[in-house]
Image (tube, rainbow, N blue to C red):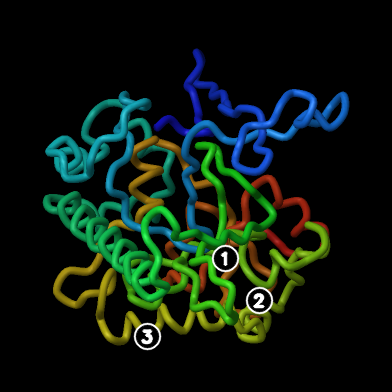
Amino acid sequence: MAKAIEEFQLSGGRTLTVGHFGLGMQGKSVGSVKQEVHDGDTINVRALGNFGVRFLGVDAPEISFRLPNNSRQFIPISDARWETFLTDPFADPAGADFAQMLSPALLNHLQENLGPGVASNHSRHAVAAQRELERQIEGDIAELEKTNDTFEFFLAFSAEITDRFGRLLAYINREQKATPRPLDYNTRLLKAGSIDPYFIWPNINPFRKAPSLKAAVLQPCSANTTAEQDSVLREARTFVQAARLAQVGVFDAQDPLQLQAFELRFLGERRLPARWVIDLSQNDDVLIPPQDYHTIPNVEDRLFIPDDYLPLFLEVGWRQLE
């Protein structure tokens, strides 16, 4: 089935996000025009297709992604073309030009994690994460005595509802009447060590609970205190630390994930990192430049700030590290 919301590439590198919807439902039947039109600028609709849901706060190794010069097709990371590319993404002229745009420190960091076998390593971890999520959902279906037809998901949204691919951005769990619910799938996979944290402001706790973006801005010299005081963020970071200590999943002692998913993506798109970073292990006032994210060694200590929101942080006293 087609996606209810999808992205199309236009000429000049631009994209257009479109949706496919029909008249809304009245009970179990499609409503009439008169029933579904609320007023001159509002109508009830139903999705004609599936929605993709991108889990917030986490980043799983990629099953497939787009290679340079093939921007419309997602190619499995197990494909031999990815093995060639990740052995040396800077080998061709366009790659060499991209390397010149990277800081020497970031280029060195990447090169330390690239080479023969990186694609197969990434693919193995991607499949393992995929299987773990399948196991969690199948376990919930069995525990709740549901079927594939009757099982439902519960989605909790944040400040941003969709991403540039038209996917919903959410924390996702099983739907159940009784409370409390178990951990959401985002956090369960962190606990299993199957995926990395990817904390992007303002879409994680405690910032997503704020009444406005301005109120959600983290105050200077309070990052570590805030991260420790919020129980949800503290728990997520603790799960990652425990997985590292146990050397499981992406931290496997014999076969750790060599290249993080967002690194594979910006290499594949030949797109510079654009999010500033705050170190959650420190109580300082420093915004670390996008290309220096790797200077924060532990992934659970990185809070990424999209460039569009940078002025909000500068206004309250954060300073950009040169």
Crowding around mark 3 (Cα neighbors within 10 Å: few <14, some 14 to 19, many 20+) is some
Residue 247 or 235: which is nearer the viewer? 235
Mark drawn on residue 125: none
Mark 3 vs 1, N-terminal side: 3
User: In front: mark 2 or mark 3?
Assistant: 3
The image shows a total of numbered marks equal to 3
SS for callout 2: helix
Measure the alpha-carbon separation of dots 2 and 1: 9 Å
Pointer 1 residue: 303
Residue 100 percent location from the top left of the image: 38, 37
Taking the spot 53% from the left edge, 31% from the top edge, the residue there is 48
SS for callout 3: helix
Amino acid type indicated by mark 1: Leu
Q: Is residue 22 left or right of residue 237?
A: right
Residue 121 percent location from the top left of the image: 18, 57
Pointer 2 residue: 223
Quarter of the figure with the N terminus: top left
Amino acid type indicated by mark 2: Ala
Crowding around mark 1 (Cα neighbors within 10 Å: few <14, some 14 to 19, many 20+) is many
Q: Is residue 130 left or right of residue 296?
A: left
Measure the alpha-carbon separation of dots 3 and 1: 19 Å
Quadrant of res 113? bottom left
Taking the spot 56% from the left edge, 27% from the top edge, the residue there is 20
